């Protein structure tokens, strides 16, 4: 199972750190995890640097040595979320199947991520809001942008493979970026509603573990991505992905009742 904050870009070479640098890095990670717990309990607007100092036992001066503001903490958490997603997307890409099967695997990964790490899932969006961006450090905003670009590069592979294999033909007015955005919009909206709007009558009437898949299939069928959902059992593909490459995560979710 993936661990929050454990992903390392394979193209990066970690420079050797001194004991002091290692201690600072460990404290930095500790603060991120504590901040994540506070946000989970009290929400983004309930999170403050005072609460982080109190929960961690470090002085506010020490906290500000790591982060410029509470918004800067949120951007930092978002960076870690994007890296964790990249780790899961790479696993999805390795799934053995057709190009559209791999996109199903991608959406299984995103669904699992949203359920295992609801704070990280929402943090990626929250960190892009103006009230966060304007109070965050330029350095961390740049790190976030680089992490997002890395994620987009991985997503590009799924589409380019489909085009190369002639499972997908781009319309003259379309682009891979447009297709990535369409899939993200549907997947994010579906997962956000399923996770946070449980009292909705619409969601109450569905109660179907494949709700996200239905919505994804509408988008992919609309793109004429072959094979169409009328010709292939993508529920079976979804289950296979859960039972193979994400077996540990799926078992853990069942264990904790999510």
Image: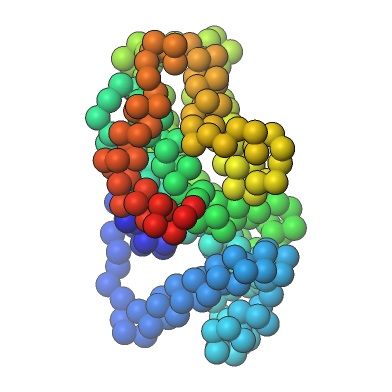
Number of marks in the rendered image: 0
Q: What residue sits 30% from the left and 46% below the top?
A: 247
**Image height of 148 relative to 63, above or below:** above
Residue 52, given in percent of the width and then of the height, sits at: 61, 79
**Image height of 40 relative to 208, above or below:** below
The residue nearer to you, when weighing 20 against 228, is 228
The residue nearer to you, when weighing 101 against 244, is 244
Instruction: Give the quarter of the image for residue 201.
Output: top right
The residue nearer to you, when weighing 184 against 112, is 112
**Image height of 43 relative to 150, above or below:** below
Residue 101, given in percent of the width and then of the height, sits at: 35, 25
Q: Is residue 115 left or right of residue 64?
A: left
Q: What residue sits 63% from the left and 55% below the top?
A: 127
Residue 205, given in percent of the width and then of the height, sits at: 65, 33
Q: Is residue 86 left or right of residue 40?
A: left
Q: What residue sits 37% from the left and 48% below the top?
A: 250
* Residue 58 visible to an observer of this rendering: yes
Q: How is the image coloured?
A: rainbow
Q: Is residue 72 left or right of residue 31?
A: right
Instruction: Give the quarter of the image for residue 192.
Output: top right
* Residue 137 visible to an observer of this rendering: no
**Image height of 143 relative to 47, above or below:** above
Q: Is residue 80 left or right of residue 137?
A: left
Name the quadrant of the N terminus.
Answer: bottom left
């Amino acid at each position: 199972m993936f661990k929050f904050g454990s992903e390392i870009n394979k193209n990066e070479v970690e420079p050797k750190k001194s004991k002091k640098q290692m201690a600072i890095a460990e404290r930095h990670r500790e603060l991120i995890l504590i901040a994540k717990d506070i946000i989970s309990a009290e929400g983004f607007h309930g999170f403050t640097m005072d609460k982080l100092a109190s929960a961690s036992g470090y002085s506010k001066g020490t906290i500000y040595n790591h982060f410029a503001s509470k918004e800067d903490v949120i951007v930092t958490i978002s960076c870690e979320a994007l890296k964790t997603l990249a780790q899961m997307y790479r696993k999805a890409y390795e799934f053995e199947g057709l190009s559209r099967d791999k996109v199903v695997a991608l959406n299984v990964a995103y669904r699992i991520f949203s359920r295992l790490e609801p704070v990280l899932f929402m943090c990626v969006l929250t960190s892009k809001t103006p009230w966060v961006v304007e109070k965050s450090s330029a350095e961390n905003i740049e790190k976030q942008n680089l992490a997002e670009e890395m994620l987009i590069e991985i997503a590009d592979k799924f589409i380019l493979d489909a085009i190369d294999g002639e499972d997908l033909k781009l319309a003259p007015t379309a682009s891979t970026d447009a297709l990535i955005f369409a899939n993200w919009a549907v997947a994010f909206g579906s997962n956000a509603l399923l996770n946070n709007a449980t009292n909705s009558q619409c969601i109450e009437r569905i109660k179907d573990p494949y709700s996200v898949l239905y919505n994804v299939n509408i988008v992919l069928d609309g793109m004429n991505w072959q094979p169409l959902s009328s010709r292939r059992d993508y529920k079976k593909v979804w289950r296979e992905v859960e039972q193979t490459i994400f077996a540990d995560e799926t078992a853990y979710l069942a264990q904790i009742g999510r």
